[in-house]
Image: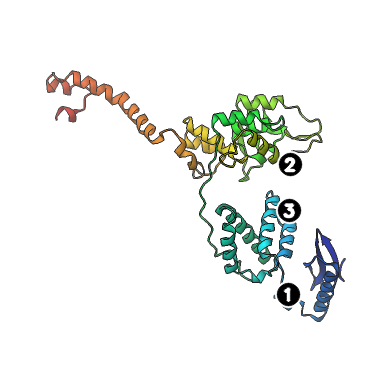
Amino acid sequence: MYRKGRVYRRGKIWYIDFFADGHRVREAAGENKRFAETVLSKRLTEVAEGIFLNIRKFEKIKFKFFAQEYLEVHAKNKRSYHSDIDRTNTLHRYFGDKFLHEITPFEVEKFKTKRAGEVSGATVNRDLACLKCLFNKAIAWGRFNGKNPVKGVRLFKEQPRLRFLEKEEIFKLLANCDEHLKPIVIIALHTGMRKGEILNLKWHDIDFKRDIIYLCQTKNGEKREIRMNNEVKSFLLKIRKHPDSPYVFCNKNGEPFGDIKKSFFTACKKSGILKNSSFRFHDLRHTFASHLVMNGIDLNTVRELLGHKTLDMTLRYSHLSPDHKKRAVELLGDRLSANFGTKLAQWLNFEKLSTEDISDKSFVNKELVNT
């Protein structure tokens, strides 16, 4: 349809759209329409002269233009879209005016060092992961013919973050939650469900007869069953269903809550939870798991309740078990003494009998008799 080419705009960026050797080509040209029209005219001339493909191998693309294309074509369909926007904005401050071929491993190392002076190592790692994905897409789409400059850059070693609420903090938090927020927090504390899993919960996912919540959209893509206790069931039954919406938690228009970050932050602030350290909604999941372990629930059961594929992720909670190593050997001692201790006491009562009489007793260890 656009054999002669065209220019169009997405957001602030103008793109050119044309055909070369039967293949459709779309290219970011910048923020100026007249410049985009000039680039299109040049490309069409190159196609007509049969030299476009050779030139395109060495095409220079600025990071800021490709980053915009990356967001619109790839990241827009991801659940982490808003996070990707924040990360590409950060990367734009460092690499925005550079061409992709100018971003070398050395430049990435410089970014890593400078960024580490501003945020935690974990945040730097997430920025690098975004940059790596961006270059992978540039290579896959034929927009960059070099090696991914992030590939050889070592990430920071991350310490697992484990922040959970004590009982008193839980009571304070619930007391300061708004009406729409309280049941969401209750479910998180009593099930360990993630925020996205709760906000996307639909009424047909809940089986009140069997006390089960069925999750079809989980982080690892596998279906999961959540057991409801009386507290969760009671709060869910109190929620008024929207007549035109399948979602459990939705606004007056029946649309699911986009985010509860602001109201959750306010509740945490009023509760004094943020005085000593930060606290995220995901930490309610840590709270759920931590209290299970502290009350003696074995780690494999906790793993199943959290939906972890392996035990490695769950092991972070092992140190919270009250004297779990001591309790383990004590349980073994109790189990053994229940059988052997009684028999040993019985043997001691017969120590004055003859060896022949004692050896006839089935409960006596003959090795002890011969000592």
The label nearer to you, 3 versus 2, is 2
Near-viewer residue (163 or 292)? 163
Tell me the mark number nearer the camera, choosing from 2 and 1. 2
Mark linked to residue 43: none
Dot 1 crowding, Cα within 10 Å, few <14, some 14–19, many 20+: some
Q: How crowded is mark 2: few (under 14 residues within 10 Å), some or many (20 or more)?
A: few
Residue 21, position in %: x, y? 79, 73
Circle 2 SS class: loop
Q: Which colour scheme is used?
A: rainbow
* In-front residue for pair 13/199: 13
- First reached walking from the N terminus: tag 3 or tag 2: 3
All told, the count of numbered labels is 3
In whole angstroms, how far apart are the C-alphas of marks 2 and 1?
Answer: 42 Å
User: Residue beneath label 3, please?
Assistant: 76
Query: Circle 1 sits in a helix, a strand or a loop, which is it?
Result: helix
**Residue at image location 67% in from the left, 69% down from the top:** 100
Q: Residue at x 48, y 30 (%)?
A: 295
10 Å neighbourhood of mark 3: few (<14), some, or many (≥20)?
some
- Dot label at residue 56: 1
**Is 24 situated above or below 366?**
below
Residue 118: where, in percent of width, then height?
A: 59, 55
Left or right of 259 on screen, residue 295: left
Instruction: Report the front residue among 44 and 276.
Output: 276
**Residue type indicated by callout 3:** Lys
Residue 216 seen in render? no
Q: Where residue 270 appears, x then y in whole percent?
A: 65, 34
Label 2 amino acid?
Answer: Gly
Give the quarter of the figure containing the C terminus.
top left
Counting residues from the start of the chain, the first of labels 3 and 1 encountered is 1
